[in-house]
Image: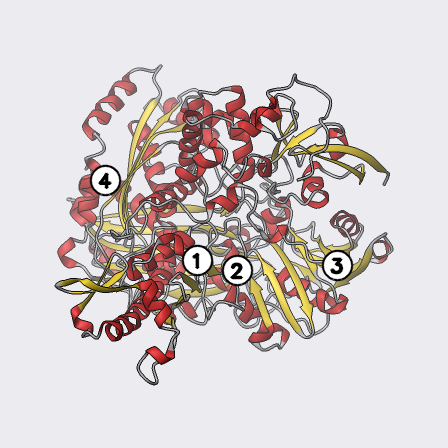
Amino acid sequence: MSDHKVQITVNGVPGTDEIEARLLLVHYLRGVRGLTGTHVGCDTSNCGACTVMVDGLTVKSCSVLAVAVDGSEVLTVEGLATEGELSPVQEGFRQCHGLQCGYCTPGMVIAATGLLLDEPSPDDATIREGIEGNLCRCTGYDMIVDSVRWAAEHGGAGAAAERHAHGGSVPVADTGPAPHGSPPQPAVTP
Amino acid sequence: MGSMIGAAVVRKEDPALLTGRGRFVDDIHLPGTLHMAYARSHLAHARIVSIDTSEAAALTGVLGVWTHEDLPGLPPSRSLPGIERPCLAKGKVHFVGEPIAVVVATDPYLAADAAAAVVVDYEQLPVMASLAAATAEDATPILDGLPSNLVLEQQLSADDAEAELAAAPHRLAIHLRNQRCAAVPMEPTVCIADWQSGSLTLYATTQTPHHQRNELAQMLGLAQQEVRVIAPDVGGGFGAKASFYPEYLLTAELSRRLRRPVKYVETRSENMTAMVHGRGQEQDIEVGFDDEGHLLALRVKITQDCGGWPDPGGVGLPTLTAFMSGGCYKIPKIAPSFRSIATNTTPVAAYRGAGRPEASFLIERVIDHVAAELGIDPLEVRRRNFIQPGEMPYPTQFEGIVYDEANFPGALESLLRHVDVDGLRKDQADRRRDPSAPLLGIGFSTFVEMGGFGPTPLFEQFGYVGGWESANVRLNVDGSAVVKVGTSPHGQGHQTTFAQIVADQLQIPFEHITLLHGDTATVQEGIGTMGSRGAPVGGSAVLKAAAKVRAKALRIAAHMLEADENDLELVDGRFGVKGAPDQGVTMGEVALRAFKPHLLPEGFDLGLDETAFHEPSNLSYPSGAHCCVVEIDRDTGRVDVLRYVAVDDCGVVLNPLLAKGQIHGGVAQGIAQALYEEVTFGEDGQPGSGSLVDYTIPAAADLPHYETDHQVTPTSFNPLGAKGLGESGATAAPQAVVNAVVDALAHLGVRDVEMPCTPQKVWRILQAATQNGS
């Protein structure tokens, strides 16, 4: 199995790693980068527990090879809260009891964040369609719909996701949105 | 401070889970961890001729490959005597997915490569993948210890009620099928065994850490203190994670042999055949009734599919179905019996409701059949048969099964305040006349189930030490509290609800209470979280422990204030002297004093640290009334739920926000069983639903908005008055939906639609009924 050198920025933190060609992005995030918030719930890309954002688009990271995102920016659930404050979507889930066991939650929160980036004021049907790629076995979804609506009414996708989607990788609030596809920003050591 | 009981506070659990800082078993990485993978059977019933592990063993990173023969002395897991399941297939496989060999490698990808390189030669045996095949005259016995595939047979009444049925003015035979479902917690089974210096630590995705500790200690010949089982964050369970799984024992043994931690992470596709399934019942029913629809006699013959290795939690499921088969109705004679049958399929055990949804579906479908037969409104048939509130507690004909306080007719009337039945009936009639309009159906479910499992004599039958639960409440020097509880939540929110109970008892801030659970080394004895026992049994233990702390704190406060205990009251976190509001001490001051021996009466036990057990006097019986309104597309047969209204009586509600979540989740699983889910096997035992591509877990767009309400009839069977509600939705919903589907088609002469009511099935019934010229 050949190894490949990749540069992947996760939650604004660049990384350079030697990885196997077959390594899935979700295992890269969990195993190589130690970001265990992104979960694996199936092996057929049905459940969405592994949903992350790559260059502004939500993807199921169990269905993406890590080498395929060489040079990209990834946003995971760990990157949503800023300065210790939950993102509007995270806060919405908390306020509306949009989670129980919490296993699908990181993927669901990222999917909902992606939905709000595309559609800041979704109606309930749009929310249900927008999270259709993410399965939850605990909640029956109704309170997740409440959670996403709450988020839409309280700030939308949130600052970290907006910055990520608009190409900036530096987790600083006042840099303003960079043009999409701009080169990676200098390293920031957490 | 007002009462915390009944407050809709948001959960303590959430910030970690929402920011990716939860700790699930697969998130734990111990230094030096090795990875285990299974080579599993591709056949449903076969003799193993040979296993060639040489290629697998030679692969890079592989530390070893083991079959049953390579692990002599490793005991089987518990079942009925003579049919215990070996940890790896012993000469024969009983179902597709049964583990045959394990490999251990330095990396999970390499372990998977090696597992795929294990070569097994089989001699095929006749496959009996259905109840019909397994009970046929010429069926081959699957279990070596048994002469046939009959595992257990019981008659739970003195006779078969033939006399009562024969004497009834009307008699109806009904066959019902409660299809096999998969629990599919979003987190599959994961465990890490870390054997050091003769003792074992196992991190596992279990609902029952203490029970697993007991099982492992017994199997490994260790003292229980040498085995520590930790269930950290667990990603759902729904009953299926209460069972013992062979990987717990295998990772332990391999960690012992290899002197390194060994981790096992199940894939979803493995999970779909390896984790126990639920339901899997065929029911042959005969009901006798009079012209007014009064039920006079009920005979229930249950055939329970146990799968290839009967699970101790699965064999007894039909007893629960039998006990609850009368539902919330006065039926003079009930005659249940069951047969538990082995088949060449995945083992069957608990899944949300575990035996009670099967009963509730049965009796609620019977009611609608009787109504249809007599041409009486199904609501009226329900009203005529209800056990009345004045008759509670109501002893059923089954010894020890006594319904606690409830109001069955009241719940239905409460439901009907939310549902305009007359308006719906008019809409239904209009749509039937308009061929372009989708059909409308209205279904009801007035249910009662069992919650709060124990007591001990009942729970012993499922292999547990007891049916009690335990709690320890300890105040720190500053008056903050640490609570340790023997339940093991996996989404239920015990950190929040149990802290509410303690805050209420001790009048200390909710924020100053921390709950520890799921670790046999830190928590005193415990049983676990299943059978809707969290609030009624676990919560009652917490209440009792907190009350003991409060009583001791009162003694200290009385000493501090030089007052009589009877003259003190605890208000807003302060013990005050009645009638002298300026005299008082806060709980914090009392807590500090509890650690100052020189300022306490001589010989006073230091500290505020109390443990309590709660053994329920009986099960509790959550009940309620649900209504489902469906729309059926005439062209495709697709069923859409337009409205789902649930009135639940779970007794005292600790936290309405979390209660709502439990009801929603249960109803969702019930609707899913009614419309979408079924585990299937081909005649050759090959799974037809072996991944989430084939097994339909509904997504957000497939499920409705739920309207919920409560009727509160506290139970006297536990000090909290809570009955439990984790399983109510899954118990109530399937028949509400199916009754609605059948109701939508009733004008075409349709009397039954089997679950799941898929578009294909409904379309075919529609076609057949329409062509018959109805």
Indicate which label's residue lies in the foreground, 3 or 2: 3
Q: Are marks 1 and 2 in contact (CB under 8 Å)?
A: no
For label 3, count other residues whose C-alpha is less than 10 Å away and answer few (under 14), some (14-19) or many (20+): few
Report the chain holding disc 4: B
Indicate which label's residue lies in the foreground, 1 or 2: 1
Report the chain holding disc 2: B
Which is more N-terminal, label 1 or label 3?
A: 3
Q: Which mark is residue B243?
A: 2
Report which residue position mark 3 lands on: B32
Q: Are marks 4 and 3 on the same chain?
A: yes
Q: Secondary structure at mark 2?
A: loop
Relative placement, left or right, of B361 versus B39 is left
* Residue A145, quarter of the rendered image: top left
Report which residue position mark 4 lands on: B371
Which is more N-terminal, label 2 or label 4?
A: 2
- Counting from the top left corner in percent of width and height, residue B438 is at 35, 20
Decide which of B184, B745 is in the foreground and name it: B184
Q: Give the residue type that dot 1 points to.
A: Thr
